[in-house]
Structures are given as structure tokens and as C-alpha cells.
Image (spheres, rainbow, N blue to C red):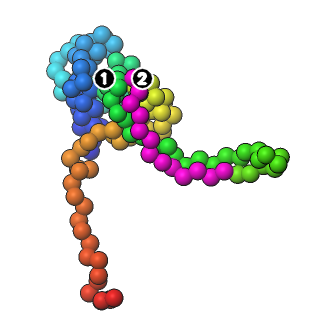
Amino acid sequence: MTRFELLQLLIGQARSNGFEFRKWYVGKLRLPWESASHAVEMLADQRRYYSLLFSHEFAESFWKAGQRITFQIPNQTFERVRPDGSIGTVHRKSYIRRSARQDAWKYHLREMALADEPLRYMKRYLRVEEELAPEPVEPLVSEEDPW
């Protein structure tokens, strides 16, 4: 998926939740409006998409207030003082967390700011057709080894 296609999907999802892309584009970037396609090209080609991704208006629309969100907490390893005074290392597995917060978009903006690639972070929250396609099924038993 190209950056242009990804941005189109992100903007489309935000627009379905009430984001006014044209108003944001003209107001924040101070560029003349030609068409939606041209605006997305400008964002993708000139790397101006960061201003879109970190825009509060976009984030509030993309992650709707009160909408149930699912996110993954990564593996954690840290040291902790035990009751006997010794220091122990705690290893926690990653887990999935669900929340229905009114300000979920603020959480996502913080996480996206920490991410290496914000577009890749955003892609996790899109439902695209290629991810929903069934994977090919491999046979459980090979012809060489029947057991």
C-alpha cells in the first residue's frame, strides 16, 4: 500500500466521523484547494502528512470519543524491590487492553509521537481489505510423512 493510498483511507475514516478535510487543509496549511486527490498528493509528496496526523481535529475525528478502542501493551521488564529488601526482575508478557474513554485520541497522539513511524502506527487502526482476506490453508499432513 502506498503512502497516498494509506492517507486516503485515514482521511476517509476520519471524514466518516465528521472531520472536515477541506476546511482543515485550507485553514491549517494555507494552501489553495484544487481537489481532494490533489490535497492528499501534496500531503504525501511533501511529507506534510505529519501535520495532519498530529492535528487535534483529525485525531478527535479518527478516534471517536467514547468509541471502544483496542490496543496492545508491549512486553515489559523492570526491577522491583521485594519486601525482604532484595531486588527482583519482573517480566510481563504483552497483552491486549480495551477501553472506552472520552479522550482516547489523546492517548493515541502520545503513542504515535513515541512511535518510529507514525503512519505505520495509524495503519494498525484501519480495516483494509488485504488484511481481511483469508490466508491460504496449508495441509496438516504432508505426503512424505503420513504420521
Q: Identify residue for label 1.
A: 61
User: Which residue is rendered at x = 48% and y = 39% of the image?
Assistant: 116
Percent x, y for residue 60? Answer: 35, 22
- Rounded to the nearest angstrom, the CA distance separating label 1 from label 2 is 11 Å
Regarding mark 1 in the picture, which secondary structure is present there? helix
Question: Per the image, is 95 magenta?
Answer: yes
Task: Tell me the SS state at disc 2.
Answer: loop
Which label sits in the foreground, 1 or 2? 2
The residue at the far right in this view is: 85
| Span shown in magenta | 90-102
Looking at the picture, does residue 44 appear above or below residue 19? below
Tag 2 or tag 1, which sits nearer the N-term? 1
Q: Nearer the viewer, residue 46 or 8?
A: 8
| Residue bearing the label numbered 2 | 103
**Point 58% across, 50% down: residue:** 92
Q: Quadrant of residue 53?
A: top left
Residue projecting furthest to the front: 83
Q: Amino acid at mark 2?
A: Asp
